[in-house]
Image (cartoon, rainbow, N blue to C red):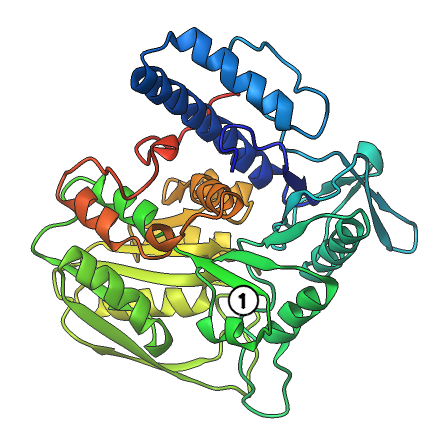
Amino acid sequence: MNYSNPADLGIIACPGGEVFAGEVAAHLKKGYRRSFERMAAEMAGRYNLDIHYVIHRINFINDAVSPPPHLPGNIEKFRTPRFNISTCFTIFPNGEVKAEILESIRGKDIFIIQDVENHYPVNFNGGDAKKTLSVNDHLMTVFVTVDAAKQAGAGRITLVLPGYPYARQHKAKGREGLTASRVGKAMEGLGVDRIITLDIHSRDIGNSFDTMRLENLHASYQIIRSLSAMDGVLGDDFVVVSPDTGAVDRNKFYANALKKPLALLYKERDYSRITKNASESNIAEIKLLGNVKNKTVFIADDILGTGGTLLKGMRVLKENGAGKVICAISLPLFTGGAISYFDEAYREGLFYRIIGTNAVYYEEALKREWYISVNISRLFAQTISRLHKQQSLSSLLDNRDIITKLLDGVKPSGAEPADFLPIDESIQPA
């Protein structure tokens, strides 16, 4: 396996996923540069050779085994790979979309990135048309892109969907569909080999696939690092509260990692009502199981939609004497005008901070004092790199060791490869 020359790795960014794909590609470029430089230094030391000679020889070998006659760039240094595959997305007057791949991807390991919850205008027709898409529109764009990649002879296709579409429709309470699994089965039928997602609503969704794998990543390391950076938060008066019974496992993980007590908000829902916004939810009653009086409260959940459930939970916590309330959300959607409701709740003092990830593109939240965004694009870049190299994902899927080192103040080593150091999340131009 030629680790220093990922010539057969390609990224296709769907409209909606372009921003996230750009950040992932930037981390990949930095990671492969570190990998190349580390390999060259190790080989030079092992064989007592001049480092410049070793770099020259590695590039010679890369050119010899690469699909074209040679790779472009200076042969005396690392040549930054181009991961992004040129693709044209067209939208027609009747709403149909088409994906056209503009270069050969035959035999390549293709990763298609899409943010199905991006509800800002995205580019079509070479930038001449802008369109705001629904989840269904984004999903159809994924379908046509996968089909185009398959028809173009891609060797392997992986979908990168930080927000898995229809994830909350994973079990039937009556005459309902199991849409979450049907979406995956449709992807599997198109020829998708693997889906990478973030903190999926139910792990049972992946059990419905025949051959396709589901890699479920977690942002817990990034969230805990952000939490630990807040002055005076992780003290003896800190308690983790699960927002409902479905989130107990997630919050139990945080409680165990932080070595803090766990409490629970028990909710009764009226399923005859449909949640419209934060003020009109289907929550009938909330009960607190545990003690939060004069304590800093931390709540972790996977999805924030209208926010009505979370806001009602915050009010119950405050009524029971809670101090600061901090929430961590993997997929902060802020639908149904949720931002304005959280602005009001913040002014009222119902919460202190909300920590979200950049898995969902949402500009308005970034302007708020109460919102903290953590960057998880490096996590996805690490996953893509390891999958491409046929390496284990164990330390990424189960990150307890690296979280323990973080909380103990030990610089992580070994838990993540040296080409993706977990200390600085900033992205520098490649």
Q: Position of residue 332 (x, y in %)?
A: 47, 54
Q: Position of residue 295 (x, y in %)?
A: 14, 59
Corner quadrant of residue 142: bottom right
Comparing 98 with 326, the one in front is 98
Q: Position of residue 398 (x, y in %)?
A: 32, 57
Comparing 157 with 310, the one in front is 157
Q: Height in image: 339 above or below 167?
A: above
Determine crowd level at label 1: few under 14, some 14-19, many 20+ residues with C-alpha closer than 10 A: some
Tell me, yes or no, if residue 320 can be seen here: no
| Left or right: residue 83 compared with residue 338 | right
Comparing 128 with 423, the one in front is 423
What is the count of numbered marks?
1
Comparing 122 with 394, the one in front is 394
Corner quadrant of residue 243: bottom left
- The residue under the point 17% across, 39% down is 231
Dot 1 falls on a residue whose secondary structure is loop
- The residue under the point 52% across, 71% down is 206
Q: Which residue is mark 1?
A: 277
- The residue under the point 35% across, 71% down is 247
Q: Residue furthest left?
A: 236
Tell me, yes or no, if residue 376 can be seen here: yes
Corner quadrant of residue 136: bottom right
| Left or right: residue 241 compared with residue 360 | left
Q: Height in image: 381 above or below 175?
A: above
| Left or right: residue 300 compared with residue 269 | left
Q: Height in image: 304 above or below 272?
A: above
Q: Residue furthest right?
A: 93
Amino acid found under the numbered disc labelled 1: Asn
Q: Height in image: 156 above or below 86?
A: below
Q: Position of residue 159 (x, y in %)?
A: 61, 54
